[in-house]
Amino acid sequence: MSSGGEEPAQSGGQGGADRPGDPAGRPRAGEPAGAPVWQSSRPGSIYDYIRVASFSLGPDGRIDQWSERAAQMLGIPARYALGKDPVEAFVPGELRDTGHRKVSEILDGREWTGLVPYRREADGATDGLAEIYVMPSRNEDGERAAVCLVVDVRALRGIETDLAASQAVFGQSPIGFTLFGTDLKLLRVNERFATVFGGPASKYRGCGPHDFLPRTEAERMTAALRRVLDTGEPVAEMQLIGLPGGEGDRRRWSVSLYRLHGASGRPIGVAALAADVTGRRRAEREAANARRNLALLNEAGARIGNSLDLETTARTLLDVAVPQFCDLASVDLYQGLLAGDEAPRGMSDGSAELRRVAFASAVSDAPLATAPGATPGPVAVGAVHRYPFNSPCAGALRTGHAQIIPGRESDDGGPEFGAVVQSTLAVPMVARDTVVGLVQFSRTKGSEPFGERDTALAVELAARAAVCIDNARLYRREHERALILQRSLLPPGDPEAAGLDIACRYLPGTTATEVGGDWFDVIELPGHRTALVVGDVMGRGLRAAVAMGELRTAVRTLALLDLEPAEVLSALDEIARGLGGDGEGRSTARGARGRSGAPEGAEPGRSARTADLSEVYLATCVYAVYDPITRRCTFANAGHLPPVLVEDGEDALLLDVPPGMPLGVGGEPFEEIEVELPDGALLALYTDGLVESRDHPLDEGLQAFRRALSGADRPLEDACDHVLSAMDTSHGEDDIALLMARVQGLPKDAVGDWNLAPEPRSVARARELARDQLTDWGLQGLVDTTELLVSELVTNALRHGHGEIRLRLLLDRTLVCEVWDADLAQPRRRRARDTDEGGRGLQLVGLLSEGWGSRRTPRGKTVWFELALPDGESPAVDPAEALLSMF
């Protein structure tokens, strides 16, 4: 019986079959606690690791008993050992004298413990070292004998080494190490484990997971321990969270579990390795946040700014931020800046009006009040609002620095804000040192609050978007100005002309600016004639548009002088040559030119600059004047594509108009031709952008244009749209201008034409003819004024002119009266003095008419005036009052 009431276990022994007490080894009822208990030791005891053998010596010093364990350990069966002298049998020859002496001492009654080398075979070399404990004894006759216990030193040294290693692991391991027993109680922990979980190591012995972990985590740990103990499958890096020692900061541990086995293979517990990974987890989270932030910035750089539309840019910013960075966000821009003001009132203190241009949310489709101190209630997209001066948002706008606005449990910022939003970042949008608006990024409750890294990222996102939004704002402003310029340079959408139905289209080559160098114009001339103009300035964009505007203004000015088409182009060519470059460019443009086109003797750099500026003002133009009375149209061309004429039932025809040189080249006269246009004919003037592109040559484009015009018996506006749809107008290489006119002509009954003899009585005859014609037209309200003015013009023709006089009345949208004579001298209006008897005729014409003027004719001049037709609302000018006003 072993000390403490336990019997040393034998290899392969039966556990607990014969012992009193219950199977678990607990005392029976009624037995005193601590009473000796007969039982078998559990497998895995020390005797599984250290094999102890025994034998005994008789009084003669020979072996008289040999245990089976001795046979196993020493490799000598009992039949070879019994009756032998142990010294002679197992001790090498050189040590036998010492061996005999020690055996004699033992038989004399002395105990002895020592190391004894032994060999397994006779005459063999020493192959073992045993520690022998020899205890003197007596046999039944009282003779001296000895009992010997033998332990293999090698096994003993291995156990010592293992114990030292185990102690080193527990004591020196840099990670927490502990051993749970089969009852899931801690048997042993090292100091590192105690450091990780807090407290001294002795505190944890005999404790379970619930003693050092929160309940939820302890249950997870217990379940894992039980699973490892039952299945033997290890658990690697199980994450546990707790508050060690009552600290305020949560800690995160990584625990790995594996089952331990004894020498017999029976599980004896679970080992646990625990490491504090709070810092590593924080670093991983920061690295993940950094990667996320970098990905967001990359996405922002790739997506924000791809559009020059302001609202699209703002929405793209929110698409990048929600939900990757925040849960809801909005963009507000200063209303004044959007309207074109450079510095709206209140912008410096953040109290100016803002307009919400974009909103995005991952939690709600409806806008929320995203910050305290804002306008009460949600702000819808497109709504104009302002932030109070003391609000955090106004402070961010005022200072230009981002502010973190924590959420509130109260409803100060609106019920939605108090219930949903946890934290808001108010980030001013700063572009070119100017705050243009505010972005609000908000995270809902349950999300991680904003930190310093988040603030830096939000500032970067807002800054990128601010530059793009400011670019979009500037582009919108410049685009609107360009459109204003373009519209101011083109005629109204529905120009009117006597005897013509007009339809026109303009398509810019660059949608970025929507301005270019192509232009068309419809100019009303005296006598109900109409000038049709189409031109194309070489180049594109704003410079070409400016050049076009200058040339168009010059064309209108020249046209109102009532010059012939060829004269108009000649004067326009001189103007175009003077427009290019600075003063030096203008002077050298008129000088002699070498083969390269540069002025001779000019400096190379200056010549290059002058040539570049002059090239911008090179232009082509076709100028046509249509007379609805004669149905004849006079054309002159300056390097432009020929007009196209379509008569009823005929194919479209390119008119053979002499092309001439482009405007700005100079040195060549322009020719003109006159073409009769029958009623119903269609005339088309256009620019090369309509018929020429990289995809097809000019000839193919002209053929396609003629096919599109042929059979154009549909309404003129529809015919214009049909042409554009049939042609390739989406190439974006050049501007496109198209001017189409359908000829109607003035009916014969709308014209009164008479020849008068150069004699005084022709004045009365002219008044009579005018009165009768106006009566036939039903214009009795204009009879008095017309008689008076006709009398003045015919009188001037008799007094200052010579030859036959011609009187013509034209009725269309206005009444026009023309008096023709053979004198070339142009009348000049002057202010008569009170004492003058004459000189008031033209002054009277100017007072009573809507307009008057004179123009040269091939055989003299024509003086005309124009009267508005009665509309029943505006009273006619009283001739008597007009006469009295001159005195």
Image: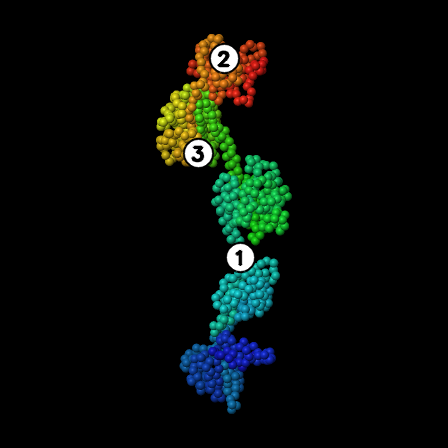
x, y (%) of residue 721?
42, 32
User: Which residue appears farthest toward the bottom when viewing the image?
Assistant: 141
Which mark sits nearer the N-terminus, 2 or 3? Answer: 3
Crowd rating for badge 3 (residues with CA inside 10 Å; few <14, some 14–19, many 20+): many
In this figure, what is the number of numbered marks?
3
Say if residue 672 shows up in the picture: no
x, y (%) of residue 838?
54, 10
Amino acid found under the numbered disc labelled 1 = Arg
Which mark sits nearer the N-terminus, 2 or 1? Answer: 1
Residue 258 versus residue 41 in the image, above or below: above
In the rendering, which numbered label is found on residue 509? Answer: 3
User: Disc 2 designates what residue?
Assistant: 767
Q: Are marks 2 and 3 in contact (CB under 8 Å)?
A: no
Amino acid found under the numbered disc labelled 3 = Gly
Tell me the CA gap for discs 2 and 1.
Answer: 108 Å
Q: Are marks 3 and 1 in contact (CB under 8 Å)?
A: no
Residue 783 versus residue 473 in the image, above or below: above
Say if residue 479 shows up in the picture: yes
Amino acid found under the numbered disc labelled 2 = Arg
SS assignment at label 3: loop
User: Disc 1 designates what residue?
Assistant: 281
Decide if residue 246 is on the left or right side of residue 701: right
Tell me the CA gap for discs 2 and 3.
Answer: 56 Å
x, y (%) of residue 362?
53, 49
Is 758 in front, or is 748?
748
Q: Residue at x 61, y 48 (%)?
A: 415
